Amino acid sequence: MEVKSHKLVDPDPFTIAGTFMTLAALVLQFVQVRQGASSGKTTPHAVRDQNLGNLDDQCSTCEDAAKKLLRSIERGSRDVDAELYNRPHRVGYKLELDQASHSMFRHNFAQFMTTVGGVSMWINHIIAEDTHLAGRLGDHLHGSLGDLAASLNQVLEQGRANREAIHAGKQALIALHDAIEAELGKGN
């Protein structure tokens, strides 16, 4: 009787945590824009609300995709803390998943990256088309995200744990959702 080996597939945890960092950096663009936002474009309220709604929908989709991705990794890894969360943010480490888990990971990671791209598209659209709105979102985010940029830089420069990078992306999405809700609630 032949014993089948269970080949393990090893995606690099850096790519996972790096995508969460990209998400956080995208949201932080609003904070950067806020300083020069007083002399820029504006859009009519209906268009503004539609743009905010589209961004908020994309953020919700991205949040769902992130949860699915992390769940698939947690289910497929023998020790997710050691292989992903507590690993230093450096290229070249292994996250070992069996082939079935890797198949689910591959699908979920592609979905997550696609939704991060959608968030990027709407953030950059708002920055280009409604500088005032981008600035107001930046004002909301500045208070809630505080030192997030410094934290991201420490993850990169000091090779801090991937957990911090992943948390930064999640935190940025939540803060952006809150900023959108505050802006829509104003009705300006």
Image: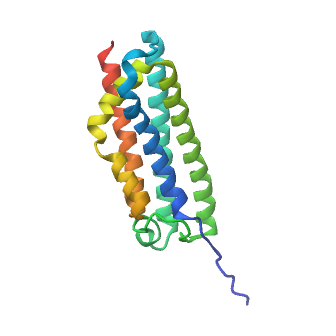
> Is 111 placed left or right of 17 in the picture?
right
Residue in view at x 26 percent, y 36 percent: 143
Rendered view: 177 above or below 154:
above
Q: Relative to residue 47, is residue 178 depicted above or below?
A: below
Depth check: give the residue in front, 29 or 93: 29
Looking at the image, residue 13 sits to the left or right of residue 158; the answer is right
Residue 52's x, y, as percent? 44, 23
Left or right: 112 with respect to 33? Answer: right
Instruction: Give the x, y percent position of residue 114.
Output: 59, 42
Total residue callouts: 0
Which residue occupies the foreground of this view, 75 or 15?
A: 15
Residue closest to the far right: 1
- The extreme top residue here reads 44
Q: Residue at x 43, y 35 (%)?
A: 29
Quadrant in which the C terminus is drawn: top left
Q: Nearer the viewer, residue 72 or 146?
A: 146
Q: Nearer the viewer, residue 112 or 99?
A: 112
Is the image coloured rainbow, by chain, by secondary structure, or in one colour? rainbow
Q: Quadrant of residue 8?
A: bottom right
Residue 73 horizontal/vertical position (percent): 50, 62
Residue 3 lies in what quarter of the image? bottom right
Instruction: For the N terminus, give its image quadrant.
Output: bottom right
Q: Quadrant of residue 135?
A: top left
> Looking at the picture, does residue 184 appear above or below residue 152?
above
Q: Position of residue 21 (x, y in %)?
A: 45, 50
Question: Residue, x 44% and y 13% (percent of image)?
Answer: 42
